[in-house]
C-alpha cells in the first residue's frame, strides 16, 4: 500500500521558493501521521534536480523500488510519500536518481529530527513530544537575557566535561548530565550555559562544527527528549541555555547535504564560492531562497522545540568575506569588486530580523573576529542585527599582556587600555573559549608567567580583569579550577585537581566573582554604555597599575540603555537603579604597593568587596582589613582619595558603603 498524501500546500511551496517559509520542520522531513485511520509516516524532501526519489529504510529492506515518492506539483522540487505502519524509531534514507548522468545516491534527511548514532548514518523517524516544566523560566527569560542583566556564560563540550570512571571512559548522557550539571553551574554562579554544537555531526573530533543534521540533536548522548530534559532542568535551576549553531559551512560526508540531488543544491557550484579550504567543507549558497528558508527554519526550530535561550552563530567572519581563508585567485569578488559577501550580509540581516520578531526574549550572538561595523546594531540602523558579539580583539590583547613577564608589563599597559577605545561600539561578550586552550596554545594556567604561585595569582587577576571590564563574560569549562594541560575532547576534565588547595582556591575565586558580579548592578547594568565606565588612572607607568570605576544606571533607566545600545528586552530591569559606583584597582606586578593613593568621587567608608590575593583563594593574604575610609585629599582629578595596600598580582573591588 502506497498512499501519496501529505500536508504540504501550494502556499507552502510558494513561500519555500520565495525563501520566506521559516517553519520547514513542520512540512519537510518525516512526520508520524494518521490518515483515514491508517497510521504511518509521511516523508517529504526537497530534491529539485532529481528524476526519481524513493524512501528506503528498515521498513522495506532498503529497497529503492518499494516506496517511490511523487513530486507535489510540476517543478516544485518537493517529493512526498505516505508509508503505512512506519513507527517511531524506524531508520531511513532517500534514494535519489539525478536528472544528470543518472547519478544515484542514498542521502539522509536534511530535516530529520533524529539520526542513528555515528558512525551509522541513517535518519530516524521521531516525534518531539515533551511535557516542559520550565514555565516560570520562559515567562521571565526576557529579564535574564536583557542587555542590562548580568550574563556569565559557562561554555561546555558535553562529551568531555565529565566522563564515567569505567574501563571504556564512557561519556555521560543528556539525562546523566541533568543530574549534576545544573547544580554545579548554579553553585558556581554562572547565569548561562553555552553548549558547543549539539546538532548531529558525523565526526566527533569536529566538536560539532561539521554539522549534517540541522534539525537533530546528536544521538551520542541520548534522544531528543533527553536533551529537552537537560535544558528543562537547567531552566528550573534558573540557568539560561545557549546553543552553538553553524550556518557557515557543512561537511562533504556522503549521507549529508553536499551535492544532494546530483547538483550543488545547498552550496555554490563554483568552489571559489562554495568550498572553504580552511575547513575542507562547503559553504551555503545564501543567494538561494530555499537555502535561506532552510537555515532560518533551523534557527527557529532550536528556539521553539528545544527552548534554547539563544544561538551563538559560529564563524560569522567566514560568511561575511568572500576571501576568508582563501589565497589570491581562489575567490570571486562581488559585483562591485569588493570582498564582501553581499548575499551573506542580507541573509544575516534576515535571520536576525525574523528570529527577534518571533522571539524578542532570546539573544543571537555573533562570533565575528574582524572589525566589520555594527554587527550588534539593529538592521534599521544599518547593522547586521545581532544582539551581541564576541570581543576577539580584547581576548587576544589581554592574553598577550598576561603572557608578558610582570617586570616588563609597564611598557605594555596599552594592550589593556586599548579595548576601552572601542568597548561601546558593539554589545560585546568577553570570551575565554575552547579555542584558546587547544592546538598547542596551552591551558590558561600554563599561559601565565612565573612560578606556580605567580601563575595562579596571574590567573586570578586575569579573571578579575574580565569581570571588571565592560561586557558580558564567557569562560570555557575547566578554566574555573585551572587545568595544567590543554583541553582534550577524548577525556574528562581533570576533576581531581579540585582537591588541591591552589585549584580549589581558584575555583572559589570564580564562584565569588560570579556571585558578587550578579549582586552589583554597577558591574553589568551599563556594560554597553560609556556612561558606565570611568578611568581613574590609566597611566600609572611607575607602578604598573590600572584603576577605574564602573557605574550602575543611576538616574538612567535600564530600558533606556537597552533601547540605545541594541537588541534586548528589559523586563524586570526597567526600574530606576540606585546610583552605585565600584572602584577597581589592578596591580600587574608581584610587588605589593604600600600606601598607594587612588582618587575616589565619594567621601565615606569603602568596603573591599573582592580581593584576589585573599588567603582563601590561595593568595598571600595582603589587604585592607575589609574596608577603608576616604580622605579629603584630592587625587586623580577626584576630590577624595584612599590610601591602600595593593597586594601583589592582584585586583581589588571596592564600593562606598556609607557617605559623609
Image: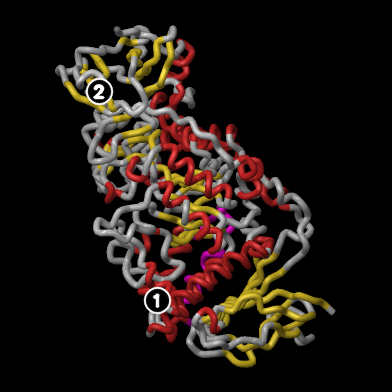
Among the two numbered marks 2 and 1 on one chain, the one whose residue lies closer to the N terminus: 2
Give the colour scheme of this rendering.
Answer: secondary structure
Percent x, y for residue 263?
A: 24, 24
Name the residue beneath numbered marker 1. Answer: 448
Q: Is residue 243 magenta?
A: no
Q: Residue at x 43, y 72 (%)?
A: 498
Quadrant of residue 534 in the image?
bottom right
Quadrant of residue 641 in the image?
bottom right
Callout in the foreground (2, 1): 2
Name the residue beneath numbered marker 2. Answer: 57
Which quadrant of the figure contains the N terminus? top left
The reply to whether residue 542 is in sight is: no
Does 426 sit above or below residue 26? below
Circle 2 crowding by C-alpha within 10 Å: few under 14, some 14–19, many from 20: many
> For this view, does 467 lie left or right of residue 291?
right
Label 1's element? loop
- The magenta-colored residue range is 410-430
Q: Residue lying furthest front in this view?
A: 166
Amino acid at each position: 500500500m502506497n498512499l501519496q498524501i501529505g500536508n504540504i500546500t501550494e502556499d507552502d511551496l510558494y513561500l519555500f521558493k520565495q525563501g520566506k517559509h521559516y517553519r520547514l520542520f513542520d512540512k519537510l522531513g518525516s512526520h508520524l501521521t494518521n490518515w483515514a485511520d491508517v497510521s504511518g509516516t509521511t516523508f517529504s524532501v526537497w530534491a529539485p534536480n532529481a528524476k526519481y526519489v524513493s524512501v528506503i529504510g528498515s521498513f522495506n529492506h532498503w529497497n529503492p523500488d518499494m516506496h517511490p515518492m511523487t513530486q507535489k506539483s510540476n517543478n516544485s522540487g518537493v517529493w512526498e510519500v505516505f508509508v503505512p505502519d512506519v513507527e517511531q524509531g524506524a531508520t531511513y534514507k532517500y534514494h535519489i536518481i539525478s536528472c544528470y548522468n543518472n547519478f544515484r545516491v542514498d542521502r539522509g534527511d536534511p530535516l530529520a529530527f533524529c539520526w542513528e548514532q555515528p558512525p551509522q548514518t541513517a535518519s530516524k523517524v521521531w516525534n518531539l513530544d515533551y511535557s516542559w516544566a520550565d514555565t516560570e523560566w520562559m515567562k521571565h527569560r526576557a529579564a535574564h537575557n536583557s542587555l542590562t542583566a548580568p550574563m556569565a556564560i559557562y561554555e561546555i563540550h558535553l562529551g568531555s566535561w565529565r566522563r564515567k570512571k569505567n574501563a571504556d571512559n564512557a561519556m555521560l548522557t543528556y539525562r546523566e548530565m541533568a543530574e549534576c550539571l545544573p547544580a554545579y553551574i548554579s553553585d558556581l554562579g554562572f547565569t548561562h550555559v553555552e553548549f558547543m554544537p549539539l546538532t548531529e555531526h558525523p565526526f566527533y573530533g569536529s566538536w560539532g562544527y561539521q554539522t549534517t543534521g540541522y534539525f537533530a540533536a546528536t544521538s551520542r548522548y541520548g534522544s531528543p527528549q533527553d536533551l529537552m530534559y537537560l535544558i528543562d532542568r537547567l531552566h528550573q535551576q534558573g540557568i539560561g541555555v545557549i546553543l552553538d549553531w553553524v550556518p557557515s559551512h557543512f561537511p562533504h560526508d556522503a549521507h549529508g547535504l553536499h551535492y544532494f540531488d546530483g547538483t550543488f543544491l545547498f552550496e555554490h557550484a563554483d568552489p571559489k564560492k562554495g568550498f572553504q579550504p580552511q575547513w575542507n567543507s562547503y559553504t551555503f549558497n545564501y543567494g538561494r531562497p530555499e537555502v535561506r528558508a532552510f537555515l532560518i527554519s533551523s534557527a527557529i526550530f532550536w528556539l521553539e522545540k528545544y527552548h534554547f535561550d539563544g544561538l551563538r552563530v559560529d564563524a560569522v567572519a567566514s560568511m561575511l568575506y568572500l576571501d576568508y581563508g582563501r589565497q589570491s585567485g581562489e575567490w570571486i569578488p562581488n559585483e562591485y569588486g569588493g570582498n564582501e559577501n553581499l548575499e551573506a550580509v542580507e541573509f544575516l540581516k534576515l535571520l536576525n530580523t525574523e528570529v527577534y520578531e518571533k522571539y524578542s526574549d532570546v539573544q543571537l550572538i555573533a562570533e565575528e573576529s574582524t572589525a566589520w561595523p555594527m554587527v550588534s546594531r539593529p538592521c534599521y540602523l544599518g547593522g547586521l542585527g545581532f544582539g551581541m558579539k564576541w570581543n576577539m580583539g580584547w581576548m587576544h590583547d589581554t592574553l598577550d599582556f598576561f603572557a608578558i613577564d610582570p617586570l616588563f608589563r609597564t611598557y605594555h599597559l596599552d594592550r589593556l587600555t586599548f579595548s576601552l577605545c572601542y568597548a561601546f561600539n558593539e554589545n560585546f561578550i568577553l570570551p575565554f573559549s575552547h579555542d584558546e586552550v587547544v592546538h598547542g596554545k596551552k591551558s590558561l594556567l600554563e599561559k601565565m608567567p612565573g612560578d606556580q604561585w605567580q601563575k595562579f595569582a596571574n590567573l586570578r587577576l586575569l579573571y578579575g580583569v574580565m569581570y571588571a571590564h565592560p561586557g558580558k563574560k564567557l569562560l570555557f569549562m575547566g578554566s574555573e579550577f585551572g587545568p595544567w594541560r590543554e583541553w582534550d575532547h577524548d577525556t574528562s576534565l581533570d576533576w581531581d585537581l579540585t582537591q588541591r588547595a591552589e585549584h580549589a582556591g581558584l575555583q572559589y575565586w570564580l564562584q565569588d566573582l560570579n556571585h558578587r558580579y550578579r549582586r552589583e548592578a554597577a558591574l553589568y547594568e551599563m556594560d554597553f554604555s560609556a556612561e558606565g565606565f570611568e578611568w581613574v588612572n590609566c597611566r600609572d607607568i611607575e607602578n604598573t597599575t590600572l584603576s577605574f570605576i564602573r557605574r550602575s544606571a543611576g538616574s538612567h533607566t535600564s530600558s533606556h540603555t537597552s533601547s540605545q545600545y541594541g537588541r534586548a528586552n528589559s523586563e524586570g530591569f526597567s526600574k530606576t537603579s540606585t546610583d552605585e559606583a565600584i572602584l577597581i584597582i589592578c596591580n600587574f606586578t608581584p610587588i605589593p604597593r604600600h600606601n598607594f593613593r587612588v582618587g575616589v568621587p565619594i567621601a565615606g567608608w569603602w568596603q573591599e568587596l573582592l580581593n584576589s590575593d585573599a588567603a582563601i583563594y590561595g593568595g598571600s593574604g595582603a589587604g585592607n582589613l575589609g574596608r577603608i575610609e576616604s580622605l579629603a585629599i584630592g587625587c586623580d582629578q577626584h576630590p577624595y582619595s584612599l590610601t591602600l595596600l595593593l597586594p601583589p598580582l592582584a585586583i581589588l573591588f571596592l564600593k562606598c558603603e556609607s557617605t559623609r
